[in-house]
Image: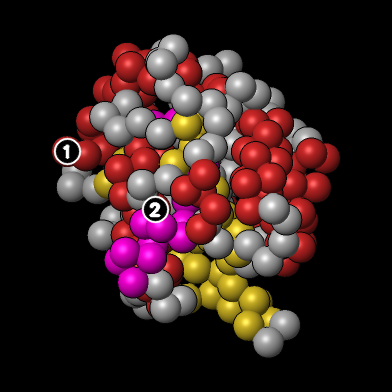
């Protein structure tokens, strides 16, 4: 960890797409620092596309897509894409919303059965605003749950044949083959980027375990400082780590990127 760079290198000059996690990457300690909105605005004003890639619920994603200075939101770990087209917000997914809702209902029953063995755990307060996922609160509106318990619950969800990943605040579970990685690569390809230009012109910023497949997929990756707590659990690491946490680290990254690009 001590040997990881904390400065962007000149080859970042080609970056035109910034993909970023939200919770504890753009936010910090449950708040959205003003530095984050300023940084997002500066990126857009410089002509750089910004895409939020998050496990956040559809209701929260709608707010981000409508009001924040971002170009698109890939929500609930890639279950859907929210994007403004001709001034109007659109939502699209690779499956029908009816199929997604049916599978979510089944999974919710299964997860509640698992949680019967963990009376201290509950679904997230925003569960009713989710279109696809079933989410468990492990640190958002409660004290942080221990890593052993988190690993046990994730393993039990995997045993159902469902996907599950832990962020800094939630365990997110879903049926379907989407993921942050798959939907991000699909989205960039739809925008006309070849596999090679995806590597040279896009980057990803994250903070926790559910970002590691993005760290694997892209060659230009950044962790904000709070990723240090997960460092030894990650199979894939960001190439560069900022000195500041959460949204403050994202603002630090933005300044470095814009300085390199001369914008």
Write down the residue under mark 1.
159
Q: Quadrant of the N terminus?
A: top left
Q: Residue at x 46, y 66 (%)?
A: 80
Q: Quadrant of residue 103?
A: bottom left
Left or right, 27 with reference to 202: right
Up-down relation of residue 129 to residue 90 (above or below)? above
Q: Which residues are magenta?
A: 194-210
Is the residue 129 above or below the residue 170 in the image? below
Point out residue 42 in the picture as x, y percentages from the top left corner: 76, 54
Residue receiving disc 2: 180
Residue 224 locus on image (x, y percent)? 56, 30
Q: Position of residue 176 (x, y in %)?
A: 28, 60
The residue under the point 37% across, 41% down is 215
* Horizontal arrangement in the rendering, residue 28 relative to residue 239 (left or right): right
State the residue in front, 203 or 172.
Answer: 203
The answer to if 198 sits in the magenta stretch is: yes
């Amino acid at each position: 960890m001590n040997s990881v760079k904390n400065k962007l290198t000149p080859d970042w000059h080609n970056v035109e797409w910034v993909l970023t996690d939200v919770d504890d990457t753009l936010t910090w300690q449950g708040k959205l620092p003003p530095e984050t909105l300023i940084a997002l605005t500066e990126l857009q004003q410089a002509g750089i596309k910004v895409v939020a890639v998050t496990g956040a619920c559809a209701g929260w994603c709608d707010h981000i897509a409508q009001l924040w200075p971002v170009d698109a939101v890939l929500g609930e770990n890639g279950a859907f894409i929210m994007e403004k087209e001709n001034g109007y917000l659109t939502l699209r997914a690779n499956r029908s919303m009816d199929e997604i809702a049916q599978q979510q209902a089944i999974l919710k029953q299964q997860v509640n059965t698992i949680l019967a063995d963990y009376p201290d755990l509950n679904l997230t307060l925003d569960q009713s605003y989710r279109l696809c996922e079933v989410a468990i609160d492990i640190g958002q509106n409660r004290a942080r749950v221990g890593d052993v318990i988190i690993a046990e619950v994730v393993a039990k969800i995997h045993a159902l044949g469902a996907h599950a990943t832990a962020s800094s605040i939630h365990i997110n579970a879903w049926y379907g083959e989407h993921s942050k990685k798959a939907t991000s690569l699909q989205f960039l390809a739809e925008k006309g980027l070849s596999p090679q230009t995806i590597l040279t012109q896009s980057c990803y910023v994250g903070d926790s375990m559910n970002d590691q497949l993005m760290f694997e997929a892209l060659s230009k990756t950044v962790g904000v400082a709070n990723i240090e707590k997960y460092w030894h659990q990650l199979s894939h690491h960001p190439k560069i780590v900022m000195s500041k946490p959460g949204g403050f680290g994202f603002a630090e990254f933005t300044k470095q990127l814009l300085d390199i690009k001369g914008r």
